[in-house]
Image (spheres, rainbow, N blue to C red):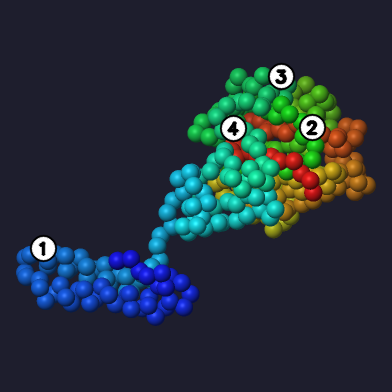
Amino acid sequence: MTPPKDATAAGGRGTLECQRWRPFVLLIWLATRARRGTLATMRLHHLFGLSLAAFVLPGADYGQQPVEPFHGKDLAGWEQRGGKAKYSVEGSGIVGTSAMNTANRLTPQEEAAGWRLLWDGKTTEGWRSARAETFPAQGWEIKDGVLTVLASGGPGSAPGGDIITRERYADFEMMADFKITKGANSGIKYFVQPNLDPITGAGAKAAVGSAIGLEFQVLDDARHPDAKAGRDGNRTMGSLYDLIPAAVGKTPNPIGEWNTARILASGRHVEHWLNGVKVLEYERGSEAFRRLVAQSKFKNIPGFGEWPGGHILLQDHGNTVSFRNLKIRHSTR
C-alpha cells in the first residue's frame, strides 16, 4: 500500500489517520472468508500482527519511509530521498552524515568549494618521511582506506617516523579524521620545517625527535601523562601543543571512534576545530603569541611559528593512531 502524497505532507494528518485503519478493514474482510487450517487463516494471523504494530508502536506511521543507506554513487539523490545531515562546517562545503560512507572521496559540493584530497586513501603519493625523501619502510600501514601509524614501543619518531606532505602550504584550511587507541599520543602539525633540528622536552637539541612545527595535539587525555604536563592543559586534545589549551567544553569522541580535526590558517590568524566546534584561535607573531612561545619548549627556536609556509605532518609518537579523509583547500578568509 503506497500512501498518497498528502499523507506525508504538512496538513495531511487526517488522511494519514484513515490510512492507519485500512489494515483493520482488510483484516475483517479476510476474517469473513478464512477457514480453519487454510492459507487464508495463516495470512490473517500475520496481518493481524503487522496491523497491531503499525497502530500501536510509536513512530510507526504509514507513509514514513525508512532512510536508505548511502551507496557512494548519487549523493544529491540520496539526500533528496531522505538522507539526514549530522553536521556541517559553515562555509566549507562539507557535510557529515551518519549514514554515508564517503571516506577519502570528495563530494561535488566539496569540489565546487575548492577542496582536494591531501591523501588518496590508497598509496603514499604526496607524502614522505620527515627525514628522508622516501616514505618510511616500516611503522605505517595503509589498509581499507585508513592510514595508520603502528605502535612501536620505542621513543617517538624513532621506528617509522613522522610523515610530511611533499608540498608546502601557507594560507589553507584542512580537515582530517583521526582515531586514537587507549593511552595514545600523536599530532597533526602544520607550518613544519623539517630542516630544523628536533628538540627534547626541555627545548635542547636532540638527535632524534619529531619535526618542528605548530601542532594540533592528538591525545588520550584521560590516560596519557602528557595531558597533565605543560601549562594549564596546553598539551591536551585539540590544543596548540605546549602553547594554548583547547576549550574546556570540547567534545572528543570515545576511544576507538573517529574524530574530525579542522585547522584554518589565513595569514597570521589560526583556528583549531574539533568535531565541528572551534576550540581555540590565535594570531601568529602577535605579542601574546610570542609570550607563550617564550614560556614553552620552543623558546630557543628563533621565529618559532612565524614561518610564511611549511609542510603538514602526521606524527609517529610510538602509539597506534589512524587517519583518513585528509583534505585541504586554499584559504581566502
Q: Earlier in the sequence, mark 4 or mark 3?
A: 4
Residue 132, numbered circle: 3
In this view, 241 is above or below 276: above
Three-letter amino acid code at the position of disc 1: Leu
Image quarter (top left, top right, bottom left or bottom right) of the N terminus: bottom left
Residue annotated with mark 2:
310
The answer to whether residue 326 is above or below residue 207 is below
Q: Earlier in the sequence, mark 1 or mark 3?
A: 1
Secondary-structure class at tag 4: loop
Who is closer to the viewer here, 19 or 254? Answer: 19
The residue under label 1 is 39
For the residues labelled 1 and 4, the Cα–Cα distance comes to 57 Å
Residue 120, numbered label: 4
State the residue at coordinates (15%, 72%).
30
For this view, does 312 lie left or right of residue 69? right
**Circle 2 crowding by C-alpha within 10 Å: few under 14, some 14–19, many from 20:** many
Task: Give the percent coordinates (x, y) of residue 244.
Answer: 80, 48
Tell me which label, 2 or 1, sits earlier in the chain: 1
Closer to the eye: label 2 or 1: 1
Q: Residue at x 39, y 80 (%)?
A: 14
Of callouts 1 and 4, which one flags the residue occurring earlier in the amino acid sequence? Answer: 1
Q: Say if mark 1 contacts mark 3, CB within 8 Å.
A: no
Quick one: SS at disc 1? helix
